Image (cartoon, coloured by chain):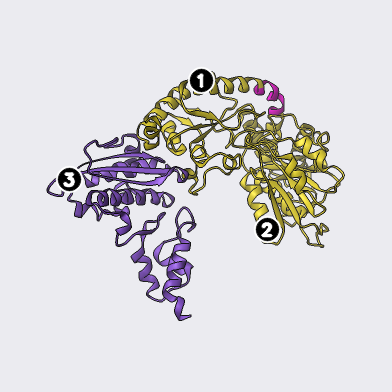
Chain colours: A yellow, B purple
Amino acid sequence: MKRVYLDHNATTPIHPEVKAAMIAAMEVFGNASSHHAFGREAHELIENARKTVADALGAKPDEIIFTSCGSESNNLVIKGVTCGNSICKIGCEKNEVIISAIEHPSVLNTAKCLQGEGKTVHLCPVDENGIIRLDILESLISHKTALVSIMYANNETGAIQPIKEISELLAGKGIIFHTDAVQAFGKIPINVKELNLDFLSLSGHKIYGPKGVGVLYKKKTRKVCPLIHGGHHEFNLRAGTENTVHIAGLGKAVELSIADMDGEWQRLGKLRDWFESEVLRRIPESYVNGGKVERTAHTSNISFRFIEGESILYDLDFDGIAVSTGSACSSGSLEPSHVLLAMGMDHGRAHSSIRFSLGRSTTKEDLAYTVDALERSVTRLRNMSPLWKGRKK
Amino acid sequence: MNQYSEILLDHFRNPRNVGELSDANGIGEVGNEACGDIMKLYIKVNDDGIIEDARFETFGCASAIASSSIATEMIIGKPVEEAIRLSNKAIAEALGGMPKHKLHCSVLAVDALARAIADYRGETVEDAPDPVICHCMGIKKSAILDVIEHGIEDLDEIAERTEAMTGACGGERCRPVIEKMVKDFFGDEK
């Protein structure tokens, strides 16, 4: 059966060149901390990757901390800069953190954890297109604000946030600014110096690299308390013998994603727009969510009214097509996507949403096949939905 | 591994008895769009009190559709008195098991059936002697009362003993109701 993978915002397949780099790195078993030749070989692989990542971000190599994933990077910065522990020399005395209402759970729930420690977390709302309300953000900022963490691009709708404007808003106020760029890095050019960022998170497996490796960019002058205390690894900020194989893979993935970035943005943007126009043309009562603003070119979030998203997901799965849904019924919670709700969408439309995320392997033929399958599924499911019938009457 | 069994997926992909039943004499509808599930069940009961035919219309996830489908199969040909005893556990078992966070779909099917039968009898479901309190797990009032009446007032222990409040919503919907039940039972003694 034909298989079409349209869930690249969840994860991406490992690029063959990344795989080759990782296999080669498996031969290098030395501990990068050791001073002999075996250790030096591992050290070199890691430092080459660090340099690649730094160059891609316009940062310096000693500003790049390797972690185990994007979630760890987010935890490290959010917990690490608000730490009041004087031993780690952070001694944060400010008590407030601002995040957006559409953050990834690894930011949302980490902030919630701070709340449990008595800190105040402000959720800055977004507009109907999923873009942060800068006016409200400005009103939330005070002398008590320790950290502002706003994602670069949203995972569900692709909405690109005004990171430069936020950075300018915060400049000179002594507030730390972090962006979770897991969905943006490798798709949008990002220069941490031009944007004046303090921290930025990225992840390997969203850019055709391996799972289990991420990065936290930390501006040289900023301090962070480690999550994992121990040896001197990663500038004393992330103890544990380095994962040489994955770091080497991440380095290669970063290199490739930067090389392909512009071409893929153009190609996928055209494919996505064609896909959306076909869906809207052929399937009545379908709506693109957050489509009126600049989005990552490969992301499309569409609601098919009067159907629950999970049932479409399983229908498409039978046709070999992989998509995702922010619907409550697939996650086991009662509430549908917090992102779509934050955009002011009613529950019905949020429940009926499907996310299609394109990637390197996506062809127009794949998308034409998907539109056919979608049309069949939506028709079938609407025919048994009491809501659809109610609407027709 | 798919979270759903082959049987459940078959009922989702090839649902039985879909659509409106024009000569139904009992209709039950439960759920709402905001919660992501609506089930409408039609039954036609003959003069001998036998459910001659049943149909459904469902807006919901794969397991909601499959639960409705198999429920119609399980009640067609049965006397009303027997059909009313259909439990959500029996539906889940007939579907080859369901993930825990999906059990509320089988509860919805039982609720829809109870309403359809009440409608046929000219009653309302509020007359039902033993309503479902925990909709995620399908735990009825009697099961919870039984534990409370054994002197248990700690909600966590009630959850452990009855499985109420342990479903998909984490007790969001039924916890206040159970809290009130505990208060009503123990309230005056404290």
Query: Percent x, y for residue A145?
Result: 78, 52
- Amino acid carrying label 3: it is Gly
Left or right: residue B146 compared with residue A290: left
* Chain-order first, disc 2 or disc 1: 2
Can residue A13 be seen at all in this image of the molecule?
no
Depth check, front residue: A225 or A286: A286
Label drawn at residue B77 = 3
Residue at (37% x, 56% y) in the render: B138
> Quarter-wise, where is residue A377 in the image?
top left
Mark 2 lies on residue: A115
The magenta segment: A256-265
Magenta span: predominant SS is: helix
Q: Farthest residue in the left direction?
A: B48
Mark 1 lies on residue: A278
Above or below, B45 relative to A282: below
Query: Percent x, y for residue A312?
Result: 44, 34
Above or below, A310 relative to A356: below
- Amino acid carrying label 2: it is Gln
Alpha carbon separation for disc pair 2 and 3: 57 Å
Q: Residues within 10 Å of mark 2 (few under 14, many from 20)?
A: some
Alpha carbon separation for disc pair 2 and 1: 45 Å
Left or right: residue A156 compared with residue A200: left
Q: Residues within 10 Å of mark 1 (few under 14, many from 20)?
A: some
Q: Secondary structure at mark 1?
A: helix
- Amino acid carrying label 1: it is Glu
Q: Check the residue under mark 1 and report the chain it is in.
A: A
